[in-house]
Amino acid sequence: MKTKNIFSSKNKNTTSIGHGLKVFDLPNSFAQKNYLELIKEYFKDVDNEKSSFHQKIIKIIPESIGEQFKYPKDTKNSIKKLLNWTRNEFKIPASTTAEITLIYNMRCASTIIKSPDYSIAGRFIINYHDNEMYRMKSPIMVAKNDITNFGVNNFDQYLKKDTVVIMGPGQLCYYNIKTNPGIWIHLKNPDGSSRKILKPRNYARLTAIVDIIINKEYARVLINSCKELGKDRISMITTKIINNMTVKYRAEIEQKNQKIKSMLLDL
């Protein structure tokens, strides 16, 4: 059975944004419902004053039952739905450990997200309810020919409401992420000029950062996905990073592949 490329999505409404990244639209019904459920279960009693900022970090380590995996008993339904959608959409195995950072921002607050560890196999940013400009800044200086962050130190990314962007493995998205405080979102036009957009008065953005930790099953998916990448610079760097991340799993994966081939030949 052919493995779907994890750098794509079932959703055909995608936009390429450079730096090897793509933005995908969330299904409207899922986005609106999951947004309300996450706020109800994690931010129900918080202060909604216009400059308030709230954050929750949830780590989900699946429990194994034979060859099946289930969520820990205390996992809230909103997180289950968020992870189920992400795993199904991007072919992430149920066995993987996930760390989710939820950030609930009012109109005048600033968001601050620390850069991921290099061991993170995949980072996904989900932007609910309101448009926002995310500013990516590398905590280390990288040269143009470096593979870390594709050699890009800083860039700004405007995300519309109810969208998700695949940031990739930790070494390719090693950025501190920040949003500016205040009621204005500052944008650059294609001709280099600037403009600004006023945030709505009912602005209440929720950002979910989903970090997936590498394991053998996800290593197999990543290896297979790299076989479908091209020979351009972005693809070559992505393949190199993933090869480095999965090297310790390759012998076991190849051994299992050979075993499956032998069983098929014996049929």
Image (spheres, rainbow, N blue to C red):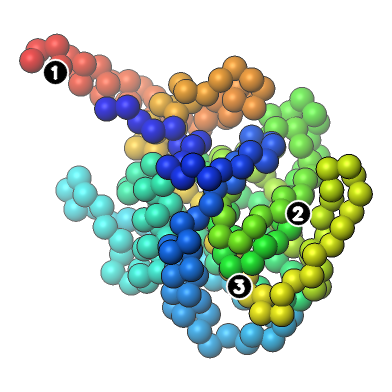
In primary-sequence order, the first of circles 3 and 1 is: 3
Type of amino acid under label 2: Arg
Q: Which mark is residue 201?
A: none
Residue where numbered disc 3 is placed: 104
| Image x and y of residue 81, in percent | 38, 62
User: Which of 179 and 243 lies nearest the eye of the viewer?
Assistant: 179
Pointer 1 and pointer 2: residues touching (CB < 8 Å)? no
In primary-sequence order, the first of circles 1 and 2 is: 2
Question: Is residue 149 positioned above or below 106 on the image?
Answer: above
Look at 26% across and 57% down and name the residue there: 70
Look at 91% across and 49% down and name the residue there: 193
Question: Is residue 29 positioned above or below 248 on the image?
Answer: below
Question: Is residue 173 positioned above or below 59 on the image?
Answer: above
Is residue 10 among the parts visible in the rendering? yes
Label 2 vs label 3: CA separation? 17 Å
Q: Which mark is residue 135?
A: 2
User: Which of 78 and 142 lies nearest the eye of the viewer?
Assistant: 78
Q: Which element type, helix, strand or loop, lies under badge 2? A: strand
| Image x and y of residue 147, in percent | 68, 29
- Left or right of 57, for residue 66: left
Question: Which dot, 3 or 1, sits closer to the camera?
Answer: 3
| Image x and y of residue 53, in percent | 67, 76
Residue where numbered disc 1 is placed: 263
In primary-sequence order, the first of circles 2 and 3 is: 3
Look at 82% across and 55% down and name the residue there: 187
Type of amino acid under label 1: Met
